[in-house]
Image: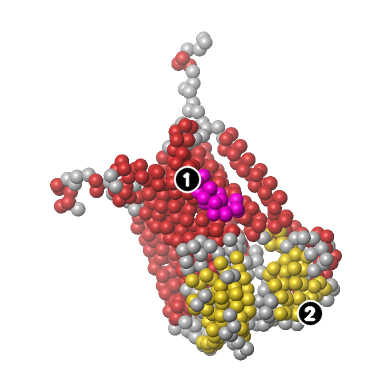
Amino acid sequence: MTTSPTMLPQARRRRRSPLPVLLGGAALLLLLGFIVFGNLSRSLEYFVTPTEYKAQSEQYVGRTIRLGGLVRGAKYDRQSLKLNFTVTDYGASYPVQYQGAVSDLFKENQGVVVRGAFTPAGVFVANELLVKHSEEYRVPTSQADIKSMLKDTK
Amino acid sequence: MLNLLSFQASALGTLGEIGLLGALLFTLVGLWLAVMGGVRHDPRATEGARRSVWAVFGFLTLSVLVLEVALLRDDFSVRYVAAHSMRVSPTWVKVTTLWAALEGSILLWAWILSLYAFVLSLTLRRDALRPWALGAMFVSLLFFVGVVAGIASPFTPLAQVPSDGAGPNPALQNHWMMAVHPVLLYLGFVGLSVPFAYAVAALVTGRLSEHWIAVTRRWTLTAWLFLTAAIVAGGWWSYETLGWGGYWAWDPVENASFIPWLLTTAFLHSLQIQERRRQLKAWNIWLIVLAYSSTVLGTFLNRSGIVQSVHAFSNGPVGAVFLGFLAFLLVAGIALAAWRSPYLRDEGEPSAVLSRESAFLTGNWLFLVFSAMVLLGTLFPVLVEAATGKKTSVGAPFFDAFAIPLGLALLFLMGVGPLLPWRRAAGERLLMALRVPGGAGVLALLVGLLFGLRSPGVLLTVALAAYNIAGLAVLTGRAARERGSFPALLREQPRRYGAYTAHAGLVVLALGVAFSGAFKSSAEVTLTRGQPMQLMGHTAVLQGLERREYAYGSSAIATVTLDGQTYTPRSNLYVQGGNTLYPTPAVRYGVFGDTYLVTTNLDPKNGWASVRLISSPLVSWIWVGMLIIVAGAGLTLVQPRLAARRPVPAGAVAAD
């Protein structure tokens, strides 16, 4: 080397390469991206009315959804806690099965939201039953009412 | 405003509003003085800002007291009292109604913020950071006091004074825990404003040395301690009142409290790297800006009603205002940090891959990814609705899918971290150090298998719990032998052993979560009076049913014996709750599991009741774990007493 030592710039302190951090972060994000896209679309629960379900039933096969409408033809056995009824929204109707205690508020023409999934035979098996009840409750009289009921019921 | 000054306005309402306006005035004055003190290096202006904090604190205290007095005296000329309280409520409900609805909770938030600012003003060092830290606190105060004095005032006059109020939210008068959880949560959320203020001061002054980190640690820990307690207390409330036997539902607002917790936990670990190794300076700034912003995000989600949630209690302009403040915090924080980033150089040699820094940094990444995922899951329905107009929600399976692996990875790192030395570790030394904890983990795994555990998540949790506890025990045992005794260790290094205690508490909590989540079972049955029924291997008999009337509602109480032990689950109706039943389950706590009985439907006239029995093993470990974590975090705040070991000079005692 011909350059005199004094001319050399002072050795810079080695800065940590950001590469490991970036790689680690990217790997984690990839892994999680994988989980998200494998899972998020499956874990997404749609809120639908029977009419909407009828229009696009293939989209909801085997997945958890929330279905809202009015109760018709309820049959409830208090001892076995088995409940069968039909949910309707003036456009379409589907049979619903539920197992569990049912409150007194559950009655004919009551607005309900059920959470569960359809069987291939077209029966909705609910694992959660929400009865719409409030001081200002009135029976929904249109599709739009049922939509807004779905929206309000957690 | 005119109405405010007219004689028709109520005395208490006017006094409360005057308190808020006074607080707002002194916030503006204080902000101005703080900026002047910072720009002109004028200690008198800074002192003025410091005293303005006292005035703000005083005025807000006045407003809080006025509202509390109005609630207790049923003064329905005050808007908030008319809207959220009523004569017949029990006194403790009237007290807690202060924070049971929107305006009052923002007032409480502002008051706690001024309380923190007050304590800060007493403890601040006389240095260059002082005016700017005060100034940043005033910016936060300006927002919250502005909101509560302006668009969400509890004191705006009413056109007509009702004879009785509308009453409190039924869900909030169902359990005493509601008195505890929100206050803890606010203490946690608001506590993060102080480290944030210090970060801003450090950025503005360019004094990005380790000083702000050293001062901030205690504040952050205090906030973290309250936040941890608040989150678990919220779960406890949910468990004790909602009647579903669970404590966490990935509800949007639960998530909104969890995100700041994750980010703060990350910050508490990464700030140690800056303290010890003068690295990760920029990282720490970003983390605290994000953590504080996420508390505002949480409040935005809570108050805007943008996501469906059990906690969302209002729509209105408040949500938009919070979104604006969130945007301001993020933009200002990012701009400040970007402006100073050329100065945010890390010092020293980079650390080896096998070092405590690496463990902390990896943990930080996991915490960040965790919080990003929770945020994604929370906001995804909003995005889907905006894009497609379809109403959706994200179910618990989504959250569990990443929360379980990330939680396990964090448990693993938590065990490695304390075993690794700073800077670098030789691979074989680490293997040596991991021998005992690793062995304990494998042993626990085998014992778990032997006892019939098959769920991989639970097995791994058990193994990692044993490995963590063994690691902590080895480290503590070795140090105790060197120093003589364990109490001496605690005195000398409360910070380290506090952290170990908190880690042990987290292990206990993790076991509780794993077992209660994986092995929760329940069964429902309709009991007729006097007829024994089998319920999950127990003999249940409905002994009696009774309805009790109260001024604020009624309770139906079922007396059920389960293998001879008496349980009295209740179903409560509240006058303002319509027909909605609010259950109070009967819970008998046990070390290995609770017996949890809740009525789902009953008919006192005909003498039957449907009951659900829920068994979730180790669920109390969650609450105990929280208490251990809080104790450990409290211990890390204790000053080490090194002097206790040294002989005291003769003169020192007299001078003390």
Q: Which residue occupies 44% across, 83% down?
A: B73
| Residue A72, label in figure | 2
Q: Is residue B550 above or below residue B203?
A: below
Q: Is residue B4 above or below residue B120?
A: below
Q: Which residue occupies 65% across, 47% down?
A: A32
Q: Nearer the viewer, residue B650 or B330?
A: B650
Q: Which quadrant holds residue B530?
A: bottom right
Q: Which residue occupies 63% across, 76% down?
A: B525
Determine the secondary structure under disc 2.
strand
Given the image, on which type of amino acid does mark 2 rest?
A: Arg
Q: Looking at the image, do the residues carrying marks 2 and 1 touch, with CB atoms under 8 Å apart?
A: no
Q: Nearer the viewer, residue B124 or A65?
A: A65
| Residue B440, label in figure | 1
| Residue B341, label in figure | none
* Left or right of residue B139, residue B377 in this image: right
Q: Residues within 10 Å of mark 1 (few under 14, many from 20)?
A: many
Q: Which residue occupies 15% across, 52% down?
A: B654
Q: Nearer the viewer, residue B446 or B607?
A: B446
Magenta segment, prevailing SS (helix, strand or loop):
helix
- Residue B216 visible in the shown view: no
Q: Nearer the viewer, residue B331 or A141?
A: A141
Whole-percent x, y for residue B396 in the image? 64, 59
Residue B180 part of the magenta-drawn span? no
Residue B459 part of the magenta-drawn span? yes
- Mark 2 to mark 1 CA distance (whole Å): 59 Å
Q: Residues within 10 Å of mark 2 (few under 14, many from 20)?
A: some
Q: Chain of mark 1?
A: B
Which region shows up in magenta? B441-463
Q: How many marks?
A: 2
Q: Is residue B459 above or below residue B587?
A: above
* Left or right of residue B638, residue B389 in this image: right
Whole-percent x, y for residue A65 in the image? 74, 64
